[in-house]
Image: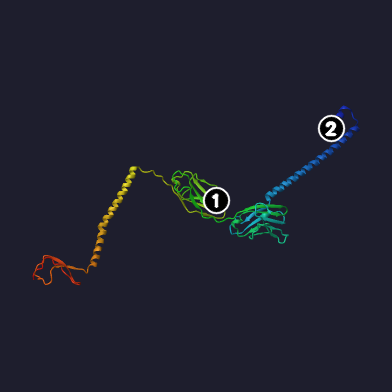
Amino acid sequence: MNISLWIDLHITQNTRPLNHKLYQKKMSFFLLLETDTMARERVTAARALCMRGYLLTALFSVWINLIYGINIQPIPEHPVIDQPVTLSVSGVSGAIHSFSWYRSSGISNSSLILSYNPTSNPAETQGPKYFPRASSFSNGSLHIVELSTTDSGYYTVQVQAGSLTSQYINLPVYVPVVKPVIRASSQRPVEYDEVALTCTATNAQRFLWSRIGGKIPSGVKYSSNNSSMTISRITLSDAGKYQCEGMNPVFKDISETYTLSLYCVCADPPAGVLAGIICGTIAGIALIACATFLLYRRFILPARQVQTGQVNSQQKSSEIYDNVIDGTKGQNPTVESPYTGLQHQPDHTYCDLNMGQIQKR
């Protein structure tokens, strides 16, 4: 519109003369029209600026809510089994009108633990997931006593204050670490084999390896949580005593010493050497047997014979015989007898052995 007026005015001035009054009227009309157009443009620019301000305000509010929104902090920071914990809520802007706690990472009526509304009677109401060890504070916090391992997991709080906001937390429950145990992938590793030492411990989240009297071999590969240590090519210098320590943010324990030994694979001896070993073994056994027999004949057997003779003499001490001349009663004692015989003597008497003929008195 302004361009057409300027063109019309320019053509009029250059093509024919105009009187002064007509020129002034056209100029006044042009000035009025230009002022109205500029005012409209300014209003449009102001509206656009306002819209930008609204958008910036909304974005700033979202940014503030993301950075400085409500926060849940466990107290203590590392909850322990059989101990209490408080899920403390902070960062709420304005007075709290009501809040609810849920046993999940989202908001669902089926996972509601409890709700708190100071204007209600009673102020605290229980949900499907309520348990007697849980209670609420007026500042939106949740208190749990005598923690158990089943209490670990997600908890969500929804707070109605200046606006409706929510936040969730994954609650851990720490348990003492069971004494770690080291196991090897091979019980009899040989040189240049790959050997992996694995440390297992219940309730441990990470592990630390150590070597008694030395350093961990270079080039060792560890698993993501250091639970296993792999030696790619084991050598004699890698043998030694190792230990591992299992830990979590609260507890830790160390394993017993594990001795890593290196075994040698020896070649079979030649047939001649093997035959010599067998023959030598047999000869040695034979020599030992002969020596044992000779010792028995020399010392043990005579001792046993002496003991046996004493026993026999004691058993027959009452039976004593004597050599006497065999003859009949009433025979002349002067007659010589061609033989002698044994005659039993009465008990409690002594006799002599008489050899040969009895001489006449």
Q: Nearer the viewer, residue 64 or 229?
A: 229
Secondary structure category for the residue under label 2: helix
Q: Nearer the viewer, residue 334 or 67?
A: 334
- Residue 148 drawn above or below residue 57: below
Instruction: Give the residue pinned by disc 1.
Output: 206
Asked whether the viewer can see residue 66, the reply is yes
Which quadrant is the C terminus positioned in?
Answer: bottom left
Residue 44: horizontal and vertical position, in percent? 80, 41
Residue 198: horizontal and vertical position, in percent? 50, 49
User: Mark 1 belongs to which amino acid?
Assistant: Arg
Residue 351: horizontal and vertical position, in percent? 16, 69
Q: Nearer the viewer, residue 46 or 251?
A: 251
Quadrant location of residue 296? Answer: bottom left
Q: CA distance from mark 1 to mark 2?
A: 82 Å
Asked whether the viewer can see residue 96, the reply is no
Which quadrant is the N terminus positioned in?
Answer: top right
Instruction: Give the residue pinned by disc 2.
Output: 4
Left or right of 19? Residue 280 is left
Secondary structure category for the residue under label 1: strand
Q: Nearer the viewer, residue 278 or 337?
A: 337
